[in-house]
């Protein structure tokens, strides 16, 4: 019988303890809500709200506007994973392909020209191979040749 009474008393204390936090949660402005939480945390530590250690600084509305400045379209795309360009380009080289050297230029069937940018070389014997140009790590592009596991770092010439 004693345990249910103790649990009831604890529950009432917990509800009473939550009231200030719930009042902060009801605030609609983010800066006001954060200031309310900071003040509560500081009062729990026995300090005035202005002395709360580690409390994040809330920028003034003008500073917040500066942070979010930019066109609405650019801001709406910020952090999005979609890109405007495809992940890879598929095309073909025409004729006999015997490989490449450090400054070779590949003219693809779609008319694009790509130059070897990494100083690599390879000897291949392929007839009109299909190629794929993909975005490489840390920027740049790599070209892959169907029928071979060799690749080269390339850059667009035109």
Image (spheres, rainbow, N blue to C red):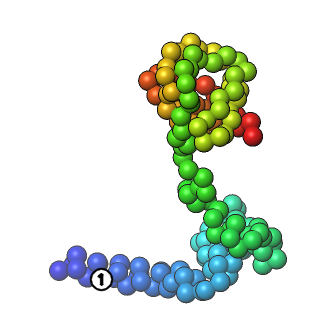
Q: Quadrant of residue 31?
A: bottom right
Q: Quadrant of residue 43?
A: bottom right
Place of residue 130 in the rendered image (x, y in percent of width and height, measured from the top left): 49, 32
Residue 9 visible (yes or no): yes
- Give left or right: position of 76 versus 128: right
Residue at 70% over, 18% down: 102
Residue nearer the viewer, 41 or 36: 36
The residue labelled by disc 1 is 8
In the rendered image of this protein, does residue 12 appear above or below residue 49?
A: below
Place of residue 23 in the rendered image (x, y in percent of width and height, measured from the top left): 55, 86
Which residue, as the protein is rendered here, is positioned at the far top? 123
Mark 1, other Cα within 10 Å: few <14 / some 14–19 / many ≥20: few
Place of residue 3 in the rendered image (x, y in percent of width and height, measured from the top left): 22, 76
Residue nearer the viewer, 55 or 3: 55
Residue at 56% over, 50% down: 86
Residue 39 visible (yes or no): no
Residue at 54% over, 82% down: 25
Which residue, as the protein is rendered here, is positioned at the far left? 1
Residue nearer the viewer, 67 or 86: 86
Which residue, as the protein is rendered here, is positioned at the far front? 95
The quadrant the N terminus occupies is: bottom left
The quadrant the C terminus occupies is: top right
Count of labels shown? 1
Place of residue 11 in the rendered image (x, y in percent of width and height, measured from the top left): 35, 81
Q: Secondary structure at mark 1?
A: helix
Residue nearer the viewer, 62 or 115: 115
Residue at 56% over, 20% down: 97
């Amino acid at each position: 019988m004693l345990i249910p009474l103790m649990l009831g008393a604890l529950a009432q204390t917990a509800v009473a303890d939550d009231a200030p936090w719930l009042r902060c949660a009801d605030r609609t402005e983010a800066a006001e809500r954060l200031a309310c939480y900071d003040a509560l945390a500081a009062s729990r530590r026995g300090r005035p709200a202005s002395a709360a250690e580690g409390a994040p600084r809330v920028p003034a509305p003008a500073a917040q506007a500066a942070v979010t400045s930019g066109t609405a379209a650019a801001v709406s795309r910020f952090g999005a994973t979609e890109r405007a360009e495809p992940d890879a380009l598929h095309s073909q080289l025409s004729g006999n392909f015997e490989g490449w050297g450090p400054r070779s230029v590949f003219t693809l069937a779609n008319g694009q020209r790509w130059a070897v940018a990494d100083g690599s070389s390879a000897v291949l014997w392929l007839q009109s191979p299909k190629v794929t140009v993909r975005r490489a790590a840390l920027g740049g592009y790599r070209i892959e040749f169907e029928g071979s596991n060799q690749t080269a770092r390339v850059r667009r010439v035109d």
